[in-house]
């Protein structure tokens, strides 16, 4: 990818508001579980998540830290040639650095803290980008996050 393509991809990712978080379903022999979640880019190849401790993802991540976050252009269909990226890494409860960016991007989430929501950091180890039909590959997470 050219420097301009990487820069465009970085701006695109930062502008998105949600993606599909996939985790390993705890107690089900490793079956995958995915659902839509809001996220923020934290930098240093990390994205921030805000999850309820009652959520299935929290239970799954407490048992196995591996996860992926899939992001895409609308409309997303296999034949559309739409841009998409899968960020793969390990999540941990964040002790700092997620609250302010999350409140800035999603002011409505400030009330979630009273419901016990917890910030998580997904340290992205691999990033797979599809730029359209027949154009895909792995890129360095730090280049776009």
Image (cartoon, grey):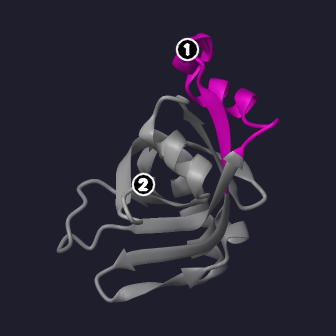
Residue 64 is covered by the magenta coloring: no
Residue 114 or 71: which is nearer the viewer?
114
- Give the CA separation, mark 2 to mark 1: 26 Å
Magenta region? 93-122
| Disc 2 secondary structure class | loop
Q: Is residue 110 at all visible to an observer of this figure? A: yes
> Which image quarter is the C terminus in?
bottom right
**Residue 40: horizontal and vertical position, in percent?**
61, 42
Name of the residue lying farthest toward the right: 96
Mark 1 neighbour density, 10 Å: few (under 14) some (14–19) many (20 or more): few
Q: Is residue 19 left or right of residue 44?
A: left
Residue 105 is covered by the magenta coloring: yes
User: What residue is drawn where x is 35% and y is 63%?
Assistant: 31
Q: Is residue 63 above or below residue 115?
A: below
The dot on residue 135 is: none
Say which quarter of the image contains residue 3: bottom right
- On the image, numbered disc 1 is attached to which residue? 115
Q: Is residue 17 at all visible to an observer of this figure? A: no
| Disc 1 secondary structure class | helix
User: What residue is drawn where x is 32% and y is 89%?
Assistant: 134
Say which quarter of the image contains residue 32: bottom left
User: What residue is drawn where x is 73% and y is 68%?
Assistant: 142
Mark 2 neighbour density, 10 Å: few (under 14) some (14–19) many (20 or more): few
- On the image, numbered disc 2 is attached to which residue? 27
> Which image quarter is the N terminus in?
bottom right
Q: Nearer the viewer, mark 2 or mark 1?
A: 2
**Mark nearer the N terminus (2 vs 1):** 2
User: What residue is drawn where x is 56% and y is 73%?
Assistant: 127
**Residue 124: horizontal and vertical position, in percent?**
65, 64
**Residue 120: horizontal and vertical position, in percent?**
66, 42
Q: Is residue 52 above or below residue 57?
A: above
């Amino acid at each position: 990818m050219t420097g301009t393509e990487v820069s465009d991809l970085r701006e695109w990712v930062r502008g998105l508001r949600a993606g599909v978080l996939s985790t390993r379903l705890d107690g089900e022999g490793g079956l995958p579980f995915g659902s839509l979640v809001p996220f923020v880019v934290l930098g240093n190849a990390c994205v921030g998540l805000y999850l309820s401790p009652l959520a299935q993802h929290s239970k799954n991540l407490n048992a196995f830290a591996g996860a992926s976050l899939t992001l895409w252009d609308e409309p997303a269909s296999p034949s559309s040639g739409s841009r998409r990226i899968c960020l793969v890494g390990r999540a941990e409860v964040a002790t700092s650095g997620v609250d302010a960016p999350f409140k800035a991007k999603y002011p409505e989430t400030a009330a979630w803290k009273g419901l016990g929501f917890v910030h998580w950091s997904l340290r992205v180890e691999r990033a797979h980008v599809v730029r359209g039909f027949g154009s895909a590959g792995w890129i360095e997470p730090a280049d776009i996050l």
